[in-house]
Every structure is written in structure tokens, then in C-alpha cells.
Amino acid sequence: MENNIEPYERQRSAQRAFEREEAYMRAQKKVKALMGFYWHLASYVIVNLFIIILIVSNGGRLFSFGTFATPLFWGIGLLFHFLGVFGPDFMFGKNWEERKIKQLMDKENKHWE
């Protein structure tokens, strides 16, 4: 009877080890994505400041479309990178709708008490 249980126990332990390894790999992938986004953000700020300073120092107007065209269009790409890393639930989070409904219902119940 023990021989029948032992492989099952080994399989459970192997499954747990696999799940831990899988969780570690997901976390590692998320950290790499975060690091990639932060490097993208840093290069966006540094390069665009350099471009704006260069344009203005060479006699260009500060408040013109040409001065801010690169930051604008690159910013759109940066926004999509942000959404790819943090997801569309960044602003409201998961279960935001349910939490908000509960909060409003609790507030309404206090009003009637």
C-alpha cells in the first residue's frame, strides 16, 4: 500500500516545486518588464529635454508644435508601453467596481440609520 502512495506524494511535491518555479519566472518577467519601462521613461525624459534645449538654444521657438512633436508622439508610445506593463487595471485595480459599489451602499445605509 505504501508504494501506491509514495509516487503520489512525490508528484505533489514535484507539482509544488513546479508551481514555485513558475511563480518565480512570472515575477522575474514582471520585474524585467518594469525595468524596461523605467529605462524607457528615463531615456524619454533625458532625450526630449536635450532636444528641446537644443531647439531653443539654436533660435527655435519654445512654444511651437515642432518643439514638442517628438515628446508628443514618443509619449504616445510610452503610454502604450505603460499600459503593456501595468495593464489597463492600473487606475482602478482589480475588483474596483465591486469595492466602489460596496462603499456606496455602506454610505447609503449609514444615511438611512
Image (cartoon, rainbow, N blue to C red):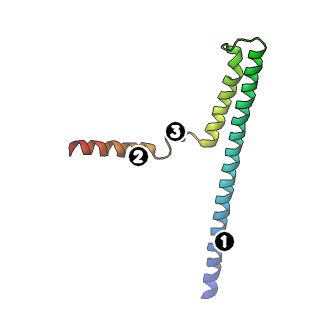
Mark closest to the chain's N terminus, 1 or 2: 1
Q: Position of residue 37 (x, y in %)?
A: 68, 40
Amino acid of disc 2:
Arg
Distance (Cα) linking label 1 and label 2: 38 Å
Q: Is residue 70 left or right of residue 8?
A: right
Q: Position of residue 82 (x, y in %)?
A: 63, 37
Asked if marks 3 and 2 touch (Cβ < 8 Å), the reply is no
Q: How many marks?
A: 3
Q: Position of residue 92 (x, y in %)?
A: 49, 40
Amino acid of disc 3:
Met
Quick one: 17 or 47, which is closer to the camera?
A: 47
Of badges 1 and 3, nearer the viewer stands: 3
Q: Residue at x 64, y 86 (%)?
A: 3
For the N terminus, give its image quadrant: bottom right
Quick one: 98 or 65, which is closer to the camera?
A: 65
Asked if marks 1 and 2 touch (Cβ < 8 Å), the reply is no
Of badges 1 and 2, nearer the viewer stands: 2
Up-down: is 112 above or below 19? above
Report the residue marked by disc 2.
Answer: 99
Up-down: is 30 above or below 73? below
Q: Residue at x 31, y 46 (%)?
A: 106
Q: Is residue 93 left or right of residue 70?
A: left
Distance (Cα) linking label 3 and label 2: 14 Å
